Every structure is written in structure tokens, then in C-alpha cells.
Image (cartoon, rainbow, N blue to C red):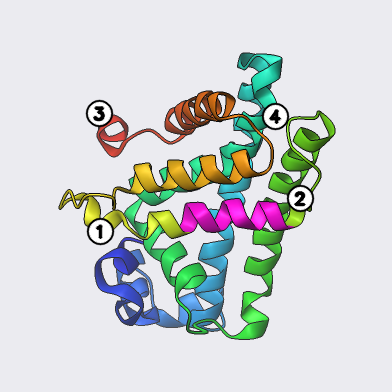
Amino acid sequence: MGRLAQSGLEGLTMRGLARDLGCTEPAIYRYFASKDALLAALTREVVDRLGFLLERATEMTDARAPEPLRPAVRALLAPELYAAVMREHAGEAALLSLVLGDPRYLVERDASAPTVEAVQGLLQRVESALADATEAGALRAGDPSTRAVSLWTAAHGASQLRKFDRFGVPNLEVAKVRRAMLSDLLCAWGHDGATVAQALDAAAAIAVELIPARSAQEG
């Protein structure tokens, strides 16, 4: 994924990948029929990892967060984990931005099926958290599927502003924009602002613990 982060889609070739891995190009084709299949497999791996981290984060929330705060924290875990991946892992961020964010159809339809399945699985976990929050009375009645997509879209959309972070452009700070959008969504669905603010802090802290800053990883 480092090659993708540095050179973009054009720089990701089967020949270059073989060179990076120290093998022959035909050896790569034994595992992946095309670059589309390779991109789909890489994306599936990243999304599956997010799903695994979401399970761990949910367990941490249930063990640490007080009961009144848990529904909101659970709802915010996936967006905060996604944000942490986009912030701390350049290769994975480039892949997700390219495959999930680029409006062009970059991966052939059949090859995309595993990626779509993985994303749907992740969104279903977010749906479940939102449905539980509604059942607990923390949110007003609403479609958890649509709400899950809204949370995911907010996290992904805000992450695309990360290029502006180094310039300190007012009102374009990734963390500030993401927090405002997520807060607005949960408050619109029935949560009170004070609870959402605490939940955002708790979810962000868990995400940082599971996906530490690059400097901490390197140290």
C-alpha cells in the first residue's frame, strides 16, 4: 500500500508490486487475476480489519463507559476508527480514498463484490449499534440503515480534508469538521449535546488506543 500512497493508482502495477515483493510478475497473477482483483482484495483486508477493531472497541466500551453513555459511544466507534485509520496509515488512507471515494468506477464490478460485502458487514454493525440506541430510548425512532450510512459518509467526507490540516486553514480542520457533523447528526436523531460531546471524547480515546499515532507506533 506504500506504493499506492506514493504514486497513486497509476503507480500501482503488477510489475512494480512483484519487484517490491521480490518475486516475478507471473507469481502475482497466480493469486490475483488482475489489478482490479488486487485492489479489491486490499480494500477487503482494510475493511475487515476495521470490523475486527470495531468488535474490540465495542468490548472496551461495554467495560468502561457508564451505561447512560454507552449507546452514543457505540454509535460513534466506527466513524472514529475510520478517522484514525485515515489519519495514521497513509497507504490504507490512499486505498480507501481511491476505491471508496473516487467517483470513477476503478474496479470492475465482479471484482468489487468482496469489497461491497465487507463494507455492508461493517455498516450492519453500525446499524445494530444505532438500533440498540433507539431501543434504549437514547435516539428517536428512525431508519438505522440510513443513519449508519450518514455516519460513515460524515467520517469519510471529513477525512478528505486532511490535505488542508498542514496549512491550518480555518474551518477546514478534519477533526473539528468531523466532530461537528457527527454531533449534529446524533443530536438531530435525539441525543442531547452534552452526552454526545462526552461520547465523542470516549470513542476518540478508544480509537487512538487501538490505532495509535504514527510516532507512538514507531517508538
Residue under label 3, please give it.
219
Q: Main secondary structure of the magenta part?
A: helix
Query: What number is the disc on residue 31?
Result: none
Vertical arrangement, residue 3 with respect to residue 13, above or below: above
**N-terminal of the two: label 3 or label 1?**
1
| Distance (Cα) linking label 1 and label 2 | 31 Å
Q: Residues within 10 Å of mark 1 (few under 14, many from 20)?
A: few
**N-terminal of the two: label 1 or label 2?**
2
**N-terminal of the two: label 3 or label 4?**
4
Residue at the right extreme, as displayed: 135
Quadrant location, the C terminus = top left
Q: Which region of the structure is painted magenta?
A: 146-156
Residue under label 1, please give it.
163
Q: Identity of the amino acid at label 3?
A: Gly
User: Which SS class for mark 1?
Assistant: helix
Residue under label 2, please give it.
144
x, y percentage for residue 76?
58, 38
| Distance (Cα) linking label 3 and label 1 | 25 Å
| Distance (Cα) linking label 3 and label 4 | 34 Å
User: Which SS class for mark 4?
Assistant: helix
Q: Identity of the amino acid at label 1?
A: Lys
x, y percentage for residue 197?
50, 28
x, y percentage for residue 90?
33, 55
**N-terminal of the two: label 3 or label 2?**
2
* Residue shown at 61% from the left, 40% from the top: 186
Report the front residue among 10 and 23.
10
Q: Identity of the amino acid at label 4?
A: Pro
**N-terminal of the two: label 2 or label 4?**
4
Kindly tell me whether residue 80 is visible in this rendering.
yes
Report the front residue among 96 and 130.
130
* Residue shown at 51% from the left, 68% from the top: 100
